[in-house]
Amino acid sequence: MKPSLIIMFVILLCFSVFYNSFAIASDSTNQLFTVKNETRDDNITLNATIEAVNEATLSAQTTGRISKIYFDTNDYVKKGAVLLEITNKEQEAQLAEAKAMIRSAKAQYHEASLGYDRYKKLYPQGAISKGELDKAQTSAATSKESLKAAEAQLVHANQSLNYTVIKAPFSGLVTKRDVEVGETVSIGQPLFTGLSLDKLRAVTEIPQRYIKALRNHLQFTIIFNDGTKLVSNDITLFSYAENQSHSFKVRIRLPPTNKILLPGMWVKAQFLKGTRRAILIPTTAILANNELTGVYRDVDGKATLTQVRLGKESNGDVEVLSGLMDGDMIYKDAYAKLQLLGTK
């Protein structure tokens, strides 16, 4: 073999020994994690459903036949928009009759008032009797009450005519339409159901064993599928339990957010129960192989695979329920350590 090749081989061999020594030294000193049994928040997480604060069913307040329908299920409507119209010939006739009654009542009241004023001037002169004066006074009072009744009838007729045009009470989505064009409706019959997307809340049920903890800390964290969170202190805790589940309903008003939220969506509702002792380690320290879940624990400078039982995972950490003790040293990157051991 040529001397130049021998020299190159020796240099490469020295570099390889130096690199492996440096990697092992770095792995054993810089990649260890000290296990600590620390006090952590003990949170309770429940399933919750998003629902609208404002949801209403509009019913007919007059009788008639549906003449026009402007919106359908799943349509978005603005507040005050006309949803449908009911035929109004009968209501217009009632309004015309009420206006005629007003004119007649005003004329009668005017005539009775003039007569009473005239009798009041004649009575001191002895031209009329006290009975005639009282009769004129009664006639004026009666005609005044008749005018009030006619005015009330006009208000009722106007309102009945307005009831033939159904408008949206708030901006939102139409979730149900109960009538068709040409259908005859009566008072109280459902027409439309809708909900507003402006104000939403999360609804869940709390088991009675957690009621005391919730009352001590009335705050919820709403967790969405993408991991984002909203915190709300606007909590309504029902004062009675459901008969079957014996749990208490909770309504959680959601603060304004740019997220797209729709009624019926599932979310997680989390509140603080108290504190507890727990061990948290980085998820990168976990080695999973079929049914085995373990970590590499440093024992006198040697990596020993130790089986562990895990709990909840959050923010890159996982709780260890058993298998480790306070003060244990583990390797942060289990798979990197496995690869390094495989090269030895």
Image (tube, rainbow, N blue to C red):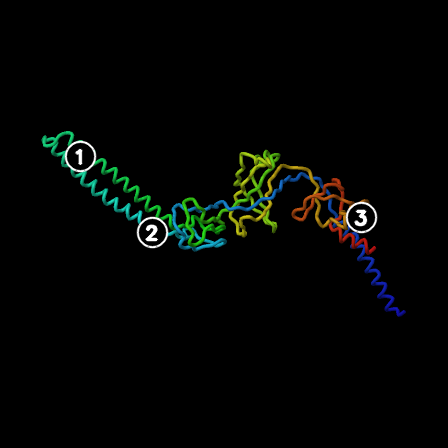
Mark 3 or mark 2, whichever is nearer to me: 2
The amino acid on which the numbered mark 2 sits, given as a three-letter code, is Lys
Any mark on residue 31, and which?
none
Q: Residue furthest right?
A: 1
- For the residue pair 147 and 197, the one nearer the viewer reads as 147
Residue under numbered circle 3: 303
Task: Name the residue located 62 percent from the left edge and 37 percent from the top edge.
Answer: 273
- Of mark 1 and mark 3, the one earlier in the sequence is 1
Marks 2 and 3: in contact by CB < 8 Å? no
Q: Left or right? Give the position of 155 relative to 43.
A: left
Residue 17, horizontal then vertical, whole percent: 83, 58
Mark 1 or mark 2, whichever is nearer to me: 2
Q: Residue furthest top?
A: 130
The amino acid on which the numbered mark 3 sits, given as a three-letter code, is Ala
Q: Left or right? Give the position of 274 relative to 251.
A: right
Residue 101, horizontal then vertical, whole percent: 26, 44
Q: Does dot 3 land on a helix, a strand or a loop?
A: strand
- Of mark 3 and mark 2, the one earlier in the sequence is 2
Residue under numbered circle 1: 136
Q: Residue furthest bottom?
A: 2
Marks 1 and 2, how far apart at CA: 40 Å
Eyeballing the image, is 324 above or below 226? above
Residue 265, horizontal then vertical, whole percent: 57, 49
Q: Determine crowd level at label 2: few under 14, some 14-19, many 20+ residues with C-alpha closer than 10 A.
A: few
Any mark on residue 89, and which?
2
